[in-house]
Image (cartoon, helix red, strand yellow):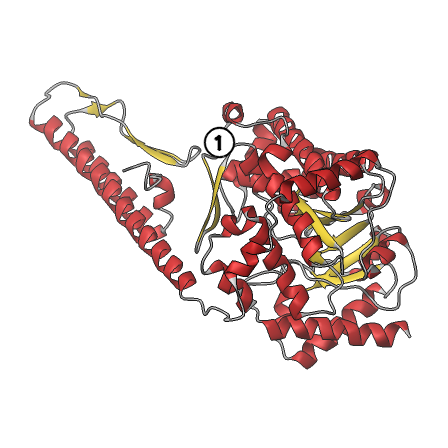
Amino acid sequence: WLKFYRFDLWSSMKDRRVRSAGLAAVLAAASIWTLSGFASFSEVAMVDTTEAAVNVQSGFLQGPGAGSGVGLGGLALAAGAAAGVLAALGSRRTSVQARAAADAQVSAWPVDPSIDMAAIFASEPKDLRAQRLAFSREVAANPHKELPRPKNDTLLKVIKGEPVDHVPKWMMRQAGRYLPEFRAIRAENHFFQVCRTPALAAEVTLQPLRRYPALDAGIIFSDILVIPEAMGMECEMVPGQGPQLHPRIASPADMERLRLVPAVEETLGYVMDAIFLTNKLNNHNVPILGFCGAPWTLFGYMVEGGGSKTWENAKLWMYDYPQEASILMRSIANWCVDYLVAQYDAGAPVLQVFDTNAGMISPQLYHHMCMEDLLFIADEVKKRRPKAILMVFTRDLQNMSALNSSNYDGVSISWTTDPVDARKQLPDKVLQGNLDPSALFASPGAVGEQVHKMISAFGPEKYIANLGHGMMPNHNAAQAAAFIDGVDRASKELMH
């Protein structure tokens, strides 16, 4: 029963009111015990916030006059601890009910009648894996040969310094819940089921390209957390909470549970299958990007067991276990290298590394503990696949100058960074970004004005228009269209 509910008492007490009620009950019990004056205890209900759990250990009561006083103190302590446990259990039931309600809401999403699930599954050849492996072997055998270019190669041209007639554009998270056709797929399939099923992943990757033919690239539908999964962690997307990884890597000893040596084909072959299938179904119209999470960002999720506002446990590792943190992040980096190379071999000419938590630690600590692994990924991929195009997104990192001499071809810029400052730090790189996603909630005219200002600030050369982070679930299709139209209008005005 406990396993079924993934019982974690402290995690269940995230609600301040519930946590306060439980702890207040324990404190009240302790006060009664103190007033009794008859006993002392060696072990009581101990809250271990480091392990994110509450361990209620048996109280060993002893002392002179053991009798009614001992009974009062012990009973009070037991009652207090029980009250805390019951409060947390009540919170857990509430959490389970909320999750069920969220799942019901997903199931209630309106289904687009144009979605033909049978046709989607029929689009996946029975020998897809065999076809993809044959293609990948050919690419690997000719590492200095460029992948076949798509019909629309504007984005590739910009990165290679070739002339173009418009600013290329795409949107991070452009396949997502803001599209009704995506919601139709998700209504019948769990998130990771979509990721792991090539036909479904290809379908949702292609949906924005069908709706917005002016887009210059697609990005394969997947998730950065597939690498922690491949390393041995279990990940579930919990409605209202986001991704949850368990059991978390709470201490260096927990690293023994992980697969530190990469085995990408065995564990993540479905992603490469999806890339290969997407290119076939897309008739190679635009490049399909591959991606991975950066070592620091993935490390944070693995140590925290999910998302966090402070990432305090991950930061603690940096200070208390710097050697072990470096070992784990280098292992993640090795996984990233093999994974990106495999995606390239499957037909993804552009590969982006997402370090979305780069700005969550001090610049000094980032450059001391994280930058080396980030640069290592680019160096190793370029050694093995010199024609691969590499992009990196170090969200909210203040000092990006080290990336200017790196093997990354381009750098995505967060909306918190001024485009002029980004150009000063990265004069030799193609830049991508960086409209605040919240700007899309404005009127189409206002969106167009902001897009024009953005492109003017970056300059239309050596530039890819994008958002400063991903599309939001509460965006809608018309708002994405306003961004795309705004880029095309500004591009036409500024480049001609």
Q: Which residue is mark 1?
A: 250
Number of marks present in the image shown? 1
Assess disc 1: are there few (<14), some (14-19) or many (≥20) residues with their C-alpha within 10 Å of its C-alpha. Answer: some
| Residue sticking out furthest to the left | 68
Q: Nearer the viewer, residue 332 or 426?
A: 332
Left/right placement of residue 167 relative to residue 219 reads right
List x then y, in percent, for residue 306: 50, 44
Left/right placement of residue 41 relative to residue 108 reads left
Q: Does residue 425 appear anywhere in the picture?
A: yes
List x then y, in percent, for residue 189: 47, 55
Locate the C terminus by quadrant. Answer: bottom right
List x then y, in percent, for residue 56: 28, 31
Locate the N terminus by quadrant. Answer: top left
Q: Does residue 397 appear anywhere in the picture?
A: no
Q: Nearer the viewer, residue 43 or 68?
A: 43
Left/right placement of residue 232 relative to residue 65 reads right
**SS type, badge 1:** loop
Q: Tag 1: residue type?
A: Ala
Residue beneath the point at 42% across and 33% down: 51
Q: Quadrant of residue 150?
A: bottom right
Residue beneath the point at 63% across and 24% down: 323
List x then y, in percent, for residue 86: 23, 44
Above/below status of 17 relative to 77? below
Above/below status of 446 relative to 95? below
Residue beneath the point at 63% across and 45% down: 128
